[in-house]
Image (tube, helix red, strand yellow):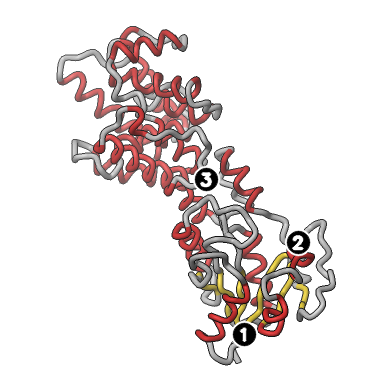
Amino acid sequence: MQRIGVLGGMMDPIHVGHLHAARAALDAGLDRVLLAPCLTPAHRARPQAPAEDRLEMCRLAACVSDRLEASDIELRAGPCYAVDTVRLLLRRYPGARITWILGADKLPTLRRWYQADDLFALCDFYVCPRPGFDAAYPVPGARVDILSQVEIKASSGDVLKRLRALDDAEALLPREIARYIALRGLYQPDYLPDLARYGMREKRVRHTLGVRQTAVDLALRWGASMQAAAIAAMLHDIAKPLPLDQMRALAARYGLRLSREILEDGNLLHGPVAAAIAEHELGVSNGAVLSAIACHTTGKAGMRTLDKVLFIADAIEPNRADYPGLSEMRRLAKTDLDAAVLLSMRRTKEYVLSRGLRFCSQTETAIRDLEKQKEETK
């Protein structure tokens, strides 16, 4: 007889607490555990992430074991009742024994679940202890065993709080799920605007999404926050569509202290102006994000990892048409971040000087600073 566990709920998002419970249930004798996000919970607010994203995060989480499986069995229209899910599973797996896995916080309400007596007759229960709740709470009629070797301390609320602070929540989320959240723009702070509102046309939006994809992967590679990289990427060009005189007006309004060469060139000015818009109009307060946005057009001395990640992501994102040095920059970005940024700045300098134009002194300073750092690390 096959023993199948069901770990349901919103999975909004799935986190290490869910995975610890699933592994404990497997250790307790189950053959397989289904990670089954529900479409519409019967007694809770609607989930924040779309169903397809929550299911995909469960698929990513299930990759750690061939005895874990993401299941869409609860992604059905209408209120999602456990008893209906168990009936569907028994039809899908004739002769199987079904065990419902839940946290101790759910025990006091279990007797009030829809058609509870039928549910208790159809399946067993594994209960995971949670701080502040009685895992031995009596539930008449239910066959309940306690998974005493695991205690769920994480919650989706904890995860969301960290994500909205632009933290990857490493202790609470598997890295691949944190990456997926950043790439898909899930659980973003309220300040992230509709890019079309800032006059971005389709090509610019496509570029922005390409920068986000590249920046997130580079942040994962080089140890920066993927959530911060995603936000910086989505906001880095919000000033780009503005006319130069409007950029200058915004720079004056927000008291930006910029050199004349930056104020006279929209290709340089849109970075610091975008950072000012993000801070003063959208309410972005994360200093690392604002720094990366501000210097993505010029670089600066003392660039931090996120600064470098956004700078090079802007230069090498997958929608960029080929230009001299692009393939080498893409290669270096995976192996030597400083070298990739330095090559990008040098290529830009060659191009600017070849056209008889003046090269940005702030970028020149950034080049010298990166060269000095590389020399010191030899």
Report the disc number at residue 228.
Answer: none
Task: Give whichever of discs 1 and 2 has the lower sequence position.
Answer: 1
Q: Is 207 displayed left or right of 183 in the figure?
A: left
In what quadrant of the picture does the N terminus appear?
bottom right
The disc labelled 3 sits on which kind of residue?
Tyr
Can residue 103 be seen here? The reply is yes
Marks 1/3: CA–CA distance: 35 Å
Quarter of the view holding residue 354? top left
In what quadrant of the picture does the C terminus appear?
top left
Can residue 224 be seen here? The reply is no
Badge 1: residue crowd in 10 Å (few <14, some 14–19, many ≥20): some
Q: Which residue is mark 1?
A: 3
Against 247, is 112 above or below?
below
Badge 2: residue crowd in 10 Å (few <14, some 14–19, many ≥20): some
The disc labelled 2 sits on which kind of residue?
Asp
The location of residue 82, given as percent across then percent down, is: 62, 72
Task: Give whichever of discs 1 and 3 has the lower sequence position.
Answer: 1
